Every structure is written in structure tokens, then in C-alpha cells.
Image (cartoon, coloured by chain):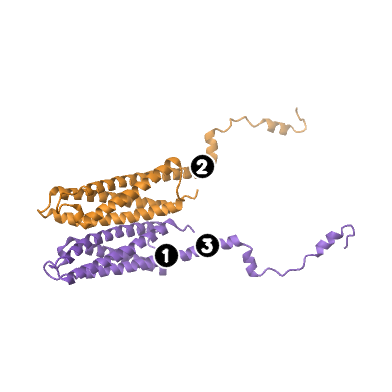
Chain colours: A orange, B purple
Amino acid sequence: MSNPDHPTLEKEAESPAPTAPPVASDIENQTPVIRYGVTAIEKRWSREELLTKVSMGLRGSGCLFSFLAFVIMASNNHGDNEDFNEYEQYRYVLAMAIISMVYTGVQAVRQFVELYTGKQWLSTASLQWINFCGDQILAYLLISATSSAIPLTDSMKFSTDYDPVFIESSAAAISMEFLAFLVLAVSALISGYQLSHQSYI
Amino acid sequence: MSNPDHPTLEKEAESPAPTAPPVASDIENQTPVIRYGVTAIEKRWSREELLTKVSMGLRGSGCLFSFLAFVIMASNNHGDNEDFNEYEQYRYVLAMAIISMVYTGVQAVRQFVELYTGKQWLSTASLQWINFCGDQILAYLLISATSSAIPLTDSMKFSTDYDPVFIESSAAAISMEFLAFLVLAVSALISGYQLSHQSYI
């Protein structure tokens, strides 16, 4: 219906050319701030999941190294003076290997169960503190055991009284214990990072 | 003006007794949320300052213990076999005592200067990471040196070839090194806590 009193109004109503509706990418570009926030959260989640997996892998390998140290040292008995049980340093290495094996094994299993079932035994905050303190204390004990056994093995090498097999086995067990220490020290750093970047989302 | 149609309304309008204006404490009580927020921030600041002071005290005592370990071990020379320089374990203890003394000394001085002048050499975040990693690595090295020297000193005690003064001096230096380790391990825990509770205010 035409309106002769207001020709301009009619012209204006007709003037806007029909435009295509905005495509999906344009809509996303219109809200860069919200989009950025979502991306940041997604990045954070994926980083946290990656860190959890790395931490699980580290503890799993820590368990493996401790198990190897335990087996090699426990079987290091060649009679008389060549028995690990005769030396307190080697007994210390064995004890720490057992403790570290149990701790890292339980932690790795817990993390695996949490990651694939979503069930948590404790609150995240207390778990993070337990992880951090546990990793740190274990790392101290492992480096202590390693350091106490190295000079003894070193001095045995300069003596002709000992079977090289006994010395090499001891050195292998100590090396495994040192690898377990390295792994737990890195794990303690990751636990410290996780503690310092607690997610409140 | 009375309103005979609504006597109850008039009664209600007159009924409220004049009350005294709220006193200052009442005004503060009316905004518990804001008041709580301010108190929380104040508490946090005082807690952070306390932690910084505790950390400074720990590093200062760590420096003292390391200095004692250094002096006792460096003067532990009674000729022939009774020279600390003859044993790699004791040389390790001496080297770690020197490194720990320098690190804790520099850190304590830095913290003292920061606390009383407000000048900072580095950003808070990078400082917190340096503190955490430095304390942790130093603690590992100190417990390693201590653990390596203890079995040697222990075995000397069962031998009659050594002067008790030499053995006791070594034991004293090792004890000082262990105290320095304990202090740095606690300092590493505090650094971890500070890292996990970074202030963004």
C-alpha cells in the first residue's frame, strides 16, 4: 500500500538491499573476548591432563626403576664378604628401593584409575599436597641412599678382594636407584607446579 | 490530618518510635562482606610478611650452619691419614658447605634488603621460581654430601687407627651440614607454598 503523504518513508523502506545472513565464522569473530576465554580454559584443561599423564608416566617409570634396584640388590649375594646384607649402605639402598616401589606403584595406579574412571579418593587440594610432600621426601631418601652406597662401591673397585660381578651388580642397583631419584625429583617439580596452578574452574 | 475511614493506617504511621542514628560500629557491621574482604587481604599480607621473615631466618641459619660445617671440616687436618683432604666424601662435604654458604648468604641478604628498602632485583614470579628450585637443588646436594660421609665416619669409629679428635670433628661438620639440609628443606617447602599462593592483589 503506497502512502502519497510520505514518499520518502516508502523509499527508505524499500532502499536496504537484501544481504546474506552472517556465516558461522562471522558470528564467532563478533565475540572475540568470550571466544578467547573459552580457548584459554580449553588450553588449560588439555595442559592439566597432559601434566597428569606425564606425572603418571614418571611415577610408573619410577616404580620400574625401584623394582629393578630392588631385584638386582636383593639377588646380589655371592657368599662370604660378597653379600649385600653385610653392608649397611646396601641394606639402605634395598630398603629405599622397596619403599619407593610401593609409593610410586600406588600413586601410578591411583592416577590411572582417576584418569579413566573419574573417581577420586580424596579432594584435589589434599591430594596435591600429599603428592608434593611424598615425592619430595622420597626423592631425599633415594638420593641419600644412592650417595651413601656410591663411595663404598667405589672403594671396592680399588680392592682386589671382591668379585667384579658383585661390584657391578651393586653399581647397577645404585644406578637404578639414582634414575628413580631423578624421576621423582622431576615429579616433585610437576607436583609443585600443579599445586601452584590449582584450577578453580 | 486524620482519616476517619482508615483509623488503622493512621495508627501505624504514628507507631514507629524514633531511634538513635547507627553508631560507627553498626555501620561497619552493616557491610560484613566488604569488611570480611578487607580483613582477609590484611590477614594475607601479614601472613606473607611473616612467611618472608621466617624464610629469611631459615636461610640465615642455613648460612650459619654451612659456615660452621665449612670451618670445622677445613680445619680438620691432623696429619697423615687424618686429613680431610684424603677422603673424597669429606671433600664433597666441604664443597657443598661452601656452595650452600654462598647461596643462603646471598638469599638472606637479598631478602633483608627487599624487606627494609622495598627494592626488588627481579620480578616476584621469577624470584619465587628461583627460590623454589635453588632451595630444592641445594637440599638434594646437602643430603647427598651428608649421606656419603656418614658411613665413612661410622666405619672409622670401629677402627683404632684414627685419632678420636679427627673423627669427632668430621662428625660435627657432618651434623652441621645435616642441619643446613633440614633448614633448606623447610625453606623449599615455604618457597613451594609461596609459589602456590601467589598474590595478584
Q: Which residue is mark 1?
A: B51
Residue B59 on image: x %, y % = 34, 66
Residue B14 on image: x %, y % = 81, 65
Toward which corner of the image does residue A3 lie, by quadrant? top right
Amino acid under disc 1 = Leu
SS of the residue at dot 1? helix
At 64% from the left and 66% from the top, the residue drawn is B27
Pinpoint the chain carrying mark 1: B
Q: Which residue is mark 2?
A: A35
Pinpoint the chain carrying mark 3: B
Toward which corner of the image does residue B35 lie, by quadrant? bottom right
Instruction: Determine the CA span between mark 1 and mark 3.
Output: 16 Å
Task: State whether residue A21 appears in this view.
Answer: yes
> Which residue ends up furthest to the right in the rendered image?
B4
Instruction: Determine the CA span between mark 1 and mark 2.
Output: 39 Å
N-terminal of the pair, mark 1 or mark 3, is 3
Pinpoint the chain carrying mark 2: A
Q: Tell whether A25 sits left or right of A82.
A: right
At 15% from the left and 67% from the top, the residue drawn is B83
User: Could you say which disc has been placed on residue B32 in the image?
Assistant: none
Q: Which residue is mark 3?
A: B40
Q: Residues within 10 Å of mark 2 (few under 14, many from 20)?
A: few
Q: Tell whether A64 sits left or right of B201.
A: left
Dot 1 and dot 2 within a common chain: no
- Nearest the camera: A22 or A70? A70
- Nearest the camera: A90 or A32? A90
Q: Residues within 10 Å of mark 3 (few under 14, many from 20)?
A: few
Amino acid under disc 3 = Ala
SS of the residue at dot 3? helix
Amino acid under disc 2 = Arg
